[in-house]
Image (cartoon, grey):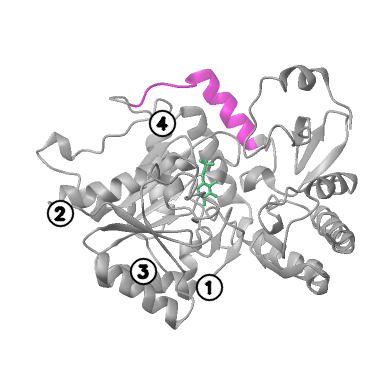
Amino acid sequence: MTTPPWQIDGYQHIWMPYTQMQTAPLPVPVVGTDGVSLILADGRRVIDGLASWWSACHGYRHPHIEAAVERQLKAMPHVMFGGINHEPALRLAQRLAALLPGDLNRVFFSESGSVSVEVAMKMAAQYWLNRGVRGRTKFVSFLHAYHGDTITAMSVCDPVNGMHAHFRGFLPEQFNTDLPLDEESTTALDRLLGEHRDEIAAVMLEPIVQGAGGMRFHPPETVATIRQLCDAHDVLLIADEIATGFARTGTMFACEQADVVPDIMCVSKALTGGTMPMAATAATDRVFEAFLSDDPAHALMHGPTFMANPLACAAAHASLDLFEREPRLEQARVIETAIAEQLADCRELPGVVDVRAKGAIGVIQVDQLRHVGWLRERFLEEGVWIRPFGDAIYITPSLVISPEDLSTLCAAMVAVVTQWSELGE
Ligand SMILES: *Cc1c(COP(=O)(O)O)cnc(C)c1O
């Protein structure tokens, strides 16, 4: 791959995410995006199997989103939100409240998923304080969870992936336990909530699909069980739908599959169709009402500089228009069927532990992710961008991907993983 001059010069100054910069190969230089493809510096087009961390649900540079952002750019790119209101944000809050399950009627905007998780945790802890209950400041999360990279969000991630040992004494200590997938784990969660309810503010869950913790799926019954146990012990439930929201798992929100309404929900990633950084934390009427009081200290003390950014709001409105006008849910289901069929042959390969599909997510889980650099190069040779992590070689394509491009993507996965399994150690 040719290295453009801006990469040679600038790489001495950039700090890349999740990267050991002494040993990592140079990242792939990208100069443009078009439809479901990335355009590389050497002019090659590759199909983006990840839709930019599963955010670009309508493909890249969708004309409807582009036009909305351009219009907003001319009118008001940004304005502070403290003491000021604007139509793009208020109409977006109204629209989200109508779209989100149940009475998740109050929307707090921020600029990244991790921050929306911080806000959700702050809301949950202060909910109890405002009601005169002291000491309920801890959270329950699950093995393989991922809720973001800021300190409090990290504290509810999987203890190993979240590097809890590494950051001991720095991260707040939380309760981390198994998802209630069977009788034993359900009893264990029930007991944990019963014994520690006076310390626990909320349970934190990625419903149906645990994303960055390994693209692991659980059935709707598990989500329903967690809701029931939270109710039984009077503990709040926070749903982190940052990955699962906006049709990724085949329903608009994953909670819908379990008919569950959480007390607080976080959304981000596909909220603006992958165009602008934006997140939202939505609360039910009950949670919001706990913040209403004559006491100013009962207010939610949070307010990012770029919250409710009008450009991001415009992109989110345009993205929601597309969900209304175009068959995204149907597309997610069609993608699920195609992925399940086309990846099935990998199941018997040595080193492959599991092959699964849920909505527009396809996963080949391996026993150990070896030859990562080799995988990256081979995928690019096959004309696709796929970035395996943990024990998962996975795709989360745009929902608008054509059957032909999806077949190319799946065929590349089958071909490359087949060769990979023959490489051995
Ligand atoms: C990506 C993600 C986050 C963090 O969002 P950022 O915008 O990267 O801070 C949190 N939770 C889940 C489930 C995610 O997929």
Left or right relative to 231: residue 310: right
- Disc sitting over residue 307 in the figure: 4
Residue shown at 89% from the left, 49% from the top: 382
Which quadrant would residue 365 be assigned to in this image?
A: bottom right
Which of the two discs, 2 and 1, sits closer to the camera? 2
Does residue 92 sit above or below 217 in this rendering?
A: above
Q: Closer to the camera: disc 2 or disc 3? A: 2
User: Which range of residues does the magenta coloring cover?
Assistant: 64-81
Q: Nearer the viewer, residue 151 or 322?
A: 151
Q: Is residue 202 left or right of residue 416?
A: left
Q: Which residue is mark 3?
A: 227
Q: How many neighbours does mark 1 have within 10 angstroms: few (below 14), some (14-19), or many (20 or more)?
A: few
Label 2 to label 4: alpha-carbon separation: 30 Å
Which residue appears at 48% of the width and 38% of the height?
Answer: 112
Of circles 1 and 4, the one toward us is: 1
Which class describes the residues within 10 Å of circle 2: few (<14), some (14-19), or many (20+)? few
Residue kind at label 1, given as amino acid type = Pro
